[in-house]
Structure formats: C-alpha cells, structure tokens
Amino acid sequence: MKKKHYFCSRVLIVQTMKNVALLIVLLCASSLYAQISPETLAKRAKRKNLTVKEWNTDSKTKTRWLDHVTTYDAEGRKVEEIEYATYGQRERVTIEYDETTGKVSKEVIYDDRDKPVRIRKYEYNEDGTKKKQYNYLPNGKLYSVKVFEYLFSD
C-alpha cells in the first residue's frame, strides 16, 4: 500500500512540475508579445507568408528583370531577401530570429553563386536596440565587430 501511495505522490509532483513549466512558457510568450507594439503586429499580420517581387524595366529597350525578392514567414517576419542584377542573383540574405526575444539573431549573406560569404550575429541592449553586430567568415572565424551607439540631441 505504501508503494502505491509513493507512486501516486510522484506522479502528482511530476504533473505539478509540468504545469509550472507550462505556466512559465506562457508568461514568457505573453511578455514577448507585450514588447511588440500593436503597429508592428498589424504590419506583420499583413505580411504573413508574403513574397514581394520588385521588377525593373530598361527605359530604352523595355527589357524587364527581377530586382528584389523579399520573403516573409507565417509570423510576418522577413526571412529572406534576394537582390538580382541583369545577369542573375547578386546577393541573398537569410534571416533567423531568436525564439524568446523575437529579434534577429543571425543573418547569412550569400554571393552570386549562392555560397555563404558572411555571417552576422547580433547582441541587443535591454531596451531592444542593437548593441553589437559580430561578423564571421563562413569558416566561423570572427573578422569584425560593429558597435552601435545611440546619441540623442536636445
């Protein structure tokens, strides 16, 4: 009888821990959405699963070519941007987001042959502004750091 009671108590403790973990996840998610302005959420809603193509036309020859393609995910966040020239792809950038903050965490820049040439990773201030941009070579070696400074004038 005591073994059965021990088992039931253990199940109850595990279930309570699962409930607490779920509550923590929900609180974190709600605080994330509380940080995003209603205007930003409205813009994202309009861009869900959207692909925008920009076309150029030569004024003399009337030749038309694709200039840019921007792709947004199911949450309305930009996930890829491709720039083209008359000969084809000039540059492609893929964008990844941090799941907890919703901020851009990583960008991978590809060349005209679709080979990675640069990787950018970001660090943010407490107010959500960019603090640092770390630039890496495709082999993972850090080659530069950009520091953001915000100066307000009266």
Image: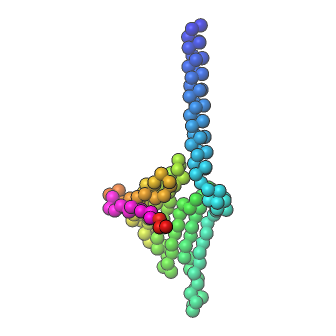
The residue under the point 46% across, 73% down is 90
- State whether the magenta stretch is mostly helix, strand or loop: strand
Residue that protrudes farthest toward the top in the picture: 1
129 left or right, relative to 30: left
Pick the residue in front: 138 or 152: 152
The residue under the point 49% across, 61% down is 94
Pick the residue in front: 142 or 62: 142
Rendered location of residue 70, percent (x, y): 57, 67
Q: Quadrant of residue 120?
A: bottom left
The residue under the point 48% across, 51% down is 126
Rendered location of residue 38, percent (x, y): 65, 56
Rendered location of residue 69, percent (x, y): 56, 70
Report the magenta residues as a range.
Answer: 142-151
Color encoding of the figure: rainbow
The residue under the point 44% across, 63% down is 150
Q: Is residue 70 above or below residue 106?
A: below
Residue 91 lies in the magenta stretch: no
